Amino acid sequence: MTETWVRTMDLPAKDRFDYWYHLATLGWGEITVEVPDTTDFRSVGRLVDLGGMLMTTEELQPVHVDRSAAQVRRSDPERWHLTLLTEGNSRFEQDGRQAELSAGDLLIYHSSAPFRCTVTSSKTEFLQFPRELNPTGLESLVSMPFSGHAGIGALVAGCLRELAALPGERQEEASRLTAVTLDLLGVLSARVRGARTAPEATPSALITAVRAFIRANLADPALDPAAIAAAHHISVRYLHRLFQQEGQTVAGWIRDRRLEHCRRDLANPALRDRPVHAVARHWGFADSAHFSRTFRSAFGLPPGEYRKLVQSGAQSP
């Protein structure tokens, strides 16, 4: 987990709105924002990167946000947004549905269709996750507010509050909570649709939680299927089955993530003085010779030659 605090008031007044807008577009895509005064824009937020998901707590001044069909076509991060409004009021519209929210209400929407949103000075806790993680029938909940005070909504709100409060080092707990949250959304959508049975636990939610855990622990050379399965309270056999359904292997997925991080570090001029073996060790490759063979097999060159080739190209006029 990577924790970042954002306080626009720490920036020069002229830069505050632009900085917030850049962060907002990472989850929403291109948007049009109306505020009374862009020179004194106020937002305080804590962002926790969960490896493919993002948990945010934000205190925000009044804004109006509009995302048009043309803006969707130009940029779409393909994200779901699950929001718990903890203070203030807001109005939201998407897919022909209009929602009025007050403190304690939950809302789900996505970046792949136009929307409009108006908020008063407010505080929210929200989870962003890829649209490919699609609990059954989630579209039935779009722009349909539900209470976070009772029933399934209270459980969802509780998970969001726990995620928002977790210290940055509690990756295992965060992985479990995000998986539970998505499963609860599946149960809620089944109720809204009048389905007779609740959906099964979402394998895609679990494998996303597993991948987030792996990303957070790549530097640990002891990271293996047994450790990963134990952290998620599943069997090693079931862990392998999850990856097989994706056409992958656990070891292969770990190796590819480590190699990609090593490749990026070797191409980074700021890290040119870091020895190749130190780069490899930093990302969990304990055996330098094995790393060199694996890197060459993946990228066609030994790591040292790759670094020289890429960095000489980057430094040439």
Image (cartoon, grey):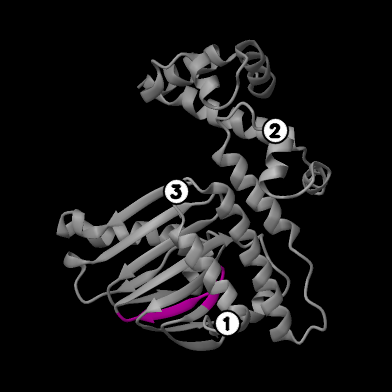
Q: Which mark is residue 224?
A: 2
Q: CA distance from mark 2 to mark 3?
A: 22 Å
Q: Which residues are magenta?
A: 107-120
In this view, 305 is above or below 248: above
* Place of residue 81 in the rendered image (x, y in percent of width and height, measured from the top left): 52, 68
* Residue 235 magenta: no
Q: Count of labels shown?
A: 3
Can you see residue 111? no
* Place of residue 71 in the rendered image (x, y in percent of width and height, measured from the top left): 47, 67
Q: CA distance from mark 1 to mark 3?
A: 35 Å
The residue carrying mark 3 is 168
The quarter in which the C terminus is drawn is top left
Q: CA distance from mark 1 to mark 2?
A: 44 Å
Marks 1 and 3 in Cβ contact (< 8 Å): no
Numbered disc in front, either 1 or 2: 2
Q: Which mark is residue 95?
A: 1
Numbered disc in front, either 1 or 3: 3
Q: Residue at x 17, y 66 (%)?
A: 40
